[in-house]
Amino acid sequence: MKTLFRFVRWLLLAAFLLASALVLHTIYGKPLQIGWFYERVFIEYAADDPELLSSLGILPRWLVGMNKILALREKAKAALGPKFKLRDFHDLVLTGGDLPLALLERRVDAWIGRQAAK
């Protein structure tokens, strides 16, 4: 439960940072200046959880990858219908290791072709 709480807190904090950056950059047309946030809120959280500070930068990359994998899964479900097996899809994605998303998409497309031909 503690890990889940830390993860949710991490997501909320990162979402705030990303939303603030987008809104302020759109309004003022310049890079985000949120020193007040770091001084008042973020440092307090980081003092409680030092890993939070170092792991926050991975969130945008993680979310992009997660969204791509979910989109590929939906694509495979739509293409294969009842032939789609989630376990096989997970094996395909995980056994490939750390791949660029374009290469992962090609692997999934080839897998869809093989599964549809069966």
Image: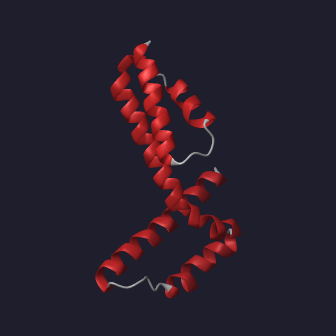
x and y percentages locating residue 68 in the rendered image? 44, 46
Q: Is residue 39 left or right of residue 68?
A: right
Q: How many marks?
A: 0
Q: Which residue: 56% across, 31% down?
A: 92
Q: Give the answer, above or below, for where 14 lies relative to 79.
A: below
- Residue sitting nearer the eye, 72 or 11: 72
Q: Give the answer, above or below, for where 49 lies relative to 84.
A: below
Q: Residue furthest left?
A: 27
Q: Quadrant of residue 47?
A: bottom right
- Residue sitting nearer the eye, 113 or 87: 113
Q: Which residue: 47% across, 72% down?
A: 17
Q: Which residue: 60% across, 36% down?
A: 94
Q: Which residue: 50% across, 87% down?
A: 36
- Residue sitting nearer the eye, 50 or 26: 26
x and y percentages locating residue 96 in the rendered image? 60, 37
Q: Quadrant of residue 2?
A: bottom right
Q: Quadrant of residue 38?
A: bottom right
x and y percentages locating residue 75 in the rendered image? 37, 33
Q: Quadrant of the C terminus?
A: top left
- Scheme of colours in the image: secondary structure
x and y percentages locating residue 8 in the rendered image? 54, 57
Q: Give the answer, above or below, for where 106 lies relative to 20.
A: above
Q: Is residue 29 left or right of residue 68?
A: left
Q: Residue furthest top?
A: 118
